[in-house]
């Protein structure tokens, strides 16, 4: 798997030829876990009702504009990944925990802060995941994380190490600090609705996406075109994965079974 171009030299690609076994092998090779658990029945397809707003129809970008907009972002270096790299924001490393489902929205929060010119602060996925799962290293899904972040926020790694599932960090001072990193406003794309998903990325909304075929959640950052096909460039929470955490999904693998993005990283 790979793609060669001036913008994405040697970038790894997940496409229709990528098997589940290959994805498992990659995780095993890197010593990483996945941990996504999506519910079987989500009614109308939206899973975040009450926590995230459905992506507004009036913000859909016509498909005829997709490729010119992507080209402009690439030429001007105004892609989300460009802004993230300029800020020096590192990708997450879930380091063997089963917390992909909380790493992705936490990282999306960090990216949104960068896009909104707020000070860069690295946040601790384990601070939320530990409380939600009763200090057990269990899988979950994004709604659990979003509800928690919307109510209590996320503790910075300066007060709760990123992967520490330990009660010693669960202090009143930590959660007082977490109030600075509450997000009340989220957008949700309908599962596998690529027009909504791609429009969100074109608007530089960093999307935490659940992928059933991978049992994994990652963060989509950039809309890209490969050989005339609209695709997505994502960042994984695995150390040693891809190019600085980045890789591309195309074909049927680009569709997200679960897709949410913070609208405002800190809501007053």
Image (cartoon, rainbow, N blue to C red):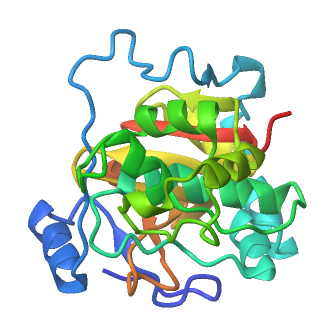
Q: Nearer the viewer, residue 247 or 161?
A: 161
Q: Nearer the viewer, residue 46 or 155?
A: 155
What is the tally of numbered marks visible in this picture?
0
Residue at image point 57% right, 86% down? 5
Residue at image point 43% right, 39% down? 142
Q: Is residue 144 above or below residue 93?
A: above
Q: Is residue 183 above or below residue 123?
A: above
Residue at image point 30% right, 80% down? 1
> Taking 220 as reference, is 252 left or right?
left
Give the residue at the far top of this rendering.
Answer: 43
Residue at image point 54% right, 56% down? 220
Q: Name the quarter where the C terminus is drawn.
A: top right
Give the residue at the far left of this rendering.
Answer: 21
Task: Residue 238: name its quadrant.
Answer: bottom left
Task: Residue 39: name its quadrant.
Answer: top left
> Taking 174 as reference, is 33 left or right?
left
Q: Position of residue 137 (x, y in %)?
A: 24, 56
Q: Position of residue 217 (x, y in %)?
A: 38, 52
Q: Position of residue 20 (x, y in %)?
A: 13, 61
Task: Residue 237: name its quadrant.
Answer: bottom left
């Amino acid at each position: 798997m790979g793609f060669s171009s001036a913008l994405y030299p040697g970038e790894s690609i997940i496409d229709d030829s990528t098997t589940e076994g290959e994805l498992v092998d990659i995780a095993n090779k890197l010593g990483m876990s996945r941990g996504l658990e999506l519910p079987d029945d989500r009614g109308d397809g939206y899973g975040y009702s009450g926590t995230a707003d459905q992506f507004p129809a009036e913000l859909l970008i016509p498909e005829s504009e997709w490729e010119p907009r992507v080209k402009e972002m690439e030429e001007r270096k105004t892609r989300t990944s460009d802004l993230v790299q300029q800020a020096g924001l590192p990708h997450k490393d879930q380091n063997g925990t089963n917390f992909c489902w909380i790493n992705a929205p936490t990282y999306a929060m960090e990216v949104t802060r960068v896009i909104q010119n707020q000070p860069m602060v690295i946040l601790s996925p384990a601070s939320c995941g530990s409380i939600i799962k009763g200090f057990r290293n269990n899988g979950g899904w994004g709604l659990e994380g979003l509800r928690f972040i919307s109510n209590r926020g996320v503790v910075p790694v300066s007060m709760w190490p990123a992967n520490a599932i330990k009660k010693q960090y669960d202090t009143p001072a930590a959660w007082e600090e977490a109030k600075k990193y509450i997000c009340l406003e989220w957008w949700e794309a309908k599962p596998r609705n690529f027009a909504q998903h791609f429009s969100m990325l074109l608007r530089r909304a960093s999307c935490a996406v659940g992928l059933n075929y991978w049992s994994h959640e990652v963060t989509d950052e950039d809309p890209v075109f490969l050989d005339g096909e609209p695709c997505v460039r994502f960042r994984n929470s695995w150390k040693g994965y891809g190019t600085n955490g980045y890789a591309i999904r195309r074909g049927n693998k680009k569709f997200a079974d679960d897709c949410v993005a913070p609208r405002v990283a800190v809501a007053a």
